[in-house]
Image (cartoon, rainbow, N blue to C red):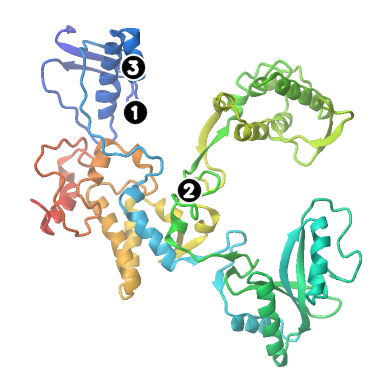
Amino acid sequence: MQIETHIHVKGAREHNLRNLEVRIPRGRLVVVTGPSGSGKSSLAFDTIYAEGHRKYMESLSTSARQTLAQLPRPDVDFVHGLSPVLAIEQRTAGESPRSTIGTVTEVADYARLLWALHGEAHCPKDGGRVVRRSLDDNVQRVLAEAAGNRIMVLAPALTAKASVLREELPRLRQRGFQRVRIEGEVKSLDDPKVVPEGRGVVPLAVDLVVDRLVAVAAQRSRLADSLELAFREGADRAIVLTQTDPAAPWQEMRLSQSLACEVCGDVFEKLTPQHFSFNHRQGACTTCGGLGRKLSFSPALVVPDKTKSVRNGALKPWRLGGKNLIIKHNALLKQLAEQLPFDANLPWAELSDEVQQTLLHGAGERLFAFKLKRMREPKAMRFEGVIPALEETWRSTASDGFRARLTTFMIRGECPECHGSRLNARSGAVVVPTGEQRLNLPQFMALDVAGAHAVARELVTRFRTEEALRDVVTGIEQRLKFLGEVGLGYLTLDRDYSTLSGGESQQRCGSPHPAGDGADGGDLRVGRTQHRTAPRRQSEPAEAPAGTAGPGEHRDRGGAR
């Protein structure tokens, strides 16, 4: 075939194309069809158009190329027979890294409201239930669980270093308090050694001893007064120590009038829908900021050449930076080789796994005698590891250029704290009972549309008579039903919206109201010719009814025709 009559593409490997070879006739209208995600856009836009655009740019002057946006060279052996190209592309998928299937279809909005209204909160630390108790409830709990025992009512007062406590404790004595508990030991405020010696700047926890009594019904009024004072002094938190006999150890019971964990006593604020949104400070993971992914240093990039030794620069990022920084790094590695010990002249690949892990991630609590520049004598120090040191330098450096150079040794991976769920631990510890399951919001959003719709149908049945929740679960169910009807039941709700193919995103946008919730409005497709790259999961006629049910129902509900 001649290049005058055909466009010849050979070895196309962009995205999911696998060494595709195709000849496309010139001067004719050619349609590329196939299921969603089969590579239609990869062939038409990312290969043929990108190569035509690149060749056109090469024909321009250097100054012109600098002012125009350029596309990367496509992964293809060659494309022959191309003339200057023009691409008209419909893009429906957003590029925001925060957009997911759940957020763009409003399923996430309704789900956040459901978890805030009906969720069972648990402590992220120990899994204890988070409940709110009145003063009477707390008194009753103490009398029931410590009946007949000696008890001591405490109020968490402050946490401060020893020098601050020496100033604050006399003020507590002036207010009438006689005893405190410091680091688990009850002491009299009249004791001249009430503050432990030799603690330096280590913060010490101080609890006020409000009262000591026996937990019997006759002391109910006194216990209530003591707990009320403890709640006032302890910012709505109190601690009750119980002892069955003088020789037995004290058992601790933490109380609160706010929402608090039954086990550890940690106090939490009231849940709102914002606590379940990774776009708000209250709900987002503090490590990744709600993205679910985080840049981190890769050991494979930190040590790109395993044939080099530590002395000859195997740890490549530690060869970057100013002269003084490089000298410091070399001194650390030299002294570490002597004390760990290991042979700094051996190739990295020949070092033991233990030595490699210590160099990259640190030696834990072990101390080394390091003598650095301007130090008169060695000082006992921990070795934090090359990767933790690089992370600290990347965060704290004032040089944007140096940070950019360090970024080349990093990869974007799953957040180590939220593991991709995007929410913080507090929000992830709230569950909603669904049949035989108890799902938190990340677990629900990890379901595919079909699985989530089954859960939503069960919730609709359960809350049919509860007006406050009925509309919420119905909104979830209708939106999921629409997505299933247009053939997107295989997508998970937490999938990034920007990863959808053109056909999948257009299926989602097939109605102005993605969920088919019955709201008034015209069909977005009226009055123009529409090109759909993939109307359904499988391009087979038998699937056509499933892909058209949603728009048809929208028409029957009164939408534009």
**Which residue is tagged 1?**
16
Left or right of residue 143, residue 421 in this image: left
Location of residue 561 in the rendering, given as x and y in whole percent from the top left corner: 7, 50
Location of residue 242 in the rendering, given as x and y in whole percent from the top left corner: 76, 77
Q: Is residue 151 visible?
A: no
Q: Which sits earlier in the primary sequence, circle 3 or circle 2?
A: 3
Is 64 in front, or is 542? 64
Q: Which mark is residue 46?
A: none
Check disc 2 and report its element: helix, strand or loop: loop
Q: Where's the N terminus, which quadrant?
A: top left
Q: CA distance from mark 3 to mark 2?
A: 39 Å
Closer to viewer: mark 1 or mark 2: 2
**Which residue is tagged 3?**
67
Left or right of residue 135, residue 119 in this image: left
Q: Answer yes or no: do the residues labelled 3 and 2 have beta carbons within 8 Å? A: no
Q: Which sits earlier in the primary sequence, circle 1 or circle 3?
A: 1
Closer to viewer: mark 3 or mark 2: 3
**Which residue is tagged 2?**
422
Q: Could you say which quadrant of the image residue 380 lies in?
A: top right
Q: Amino acid at mark 1?
A: Asn
| Label 3 crowd bin: few (<14), some (14–19), many (20+), radius 10 Å | few
Q: Answer yes or no: do the residues labelled 1 and 3 have beta carbons within 8 Å? A: no
Q: Amino acid at mark 2?
A: Arg
Is 285 above or below relative to 144? above
Left or right of residue 285, residue 334 in this image: right
Location of residue 369 in the rendering, given as x and y in whole percent from the top left corner: 85, 32
| Label 2 crowd bin: few (<14), some (14–19), many (20+), radius 10 Å | many
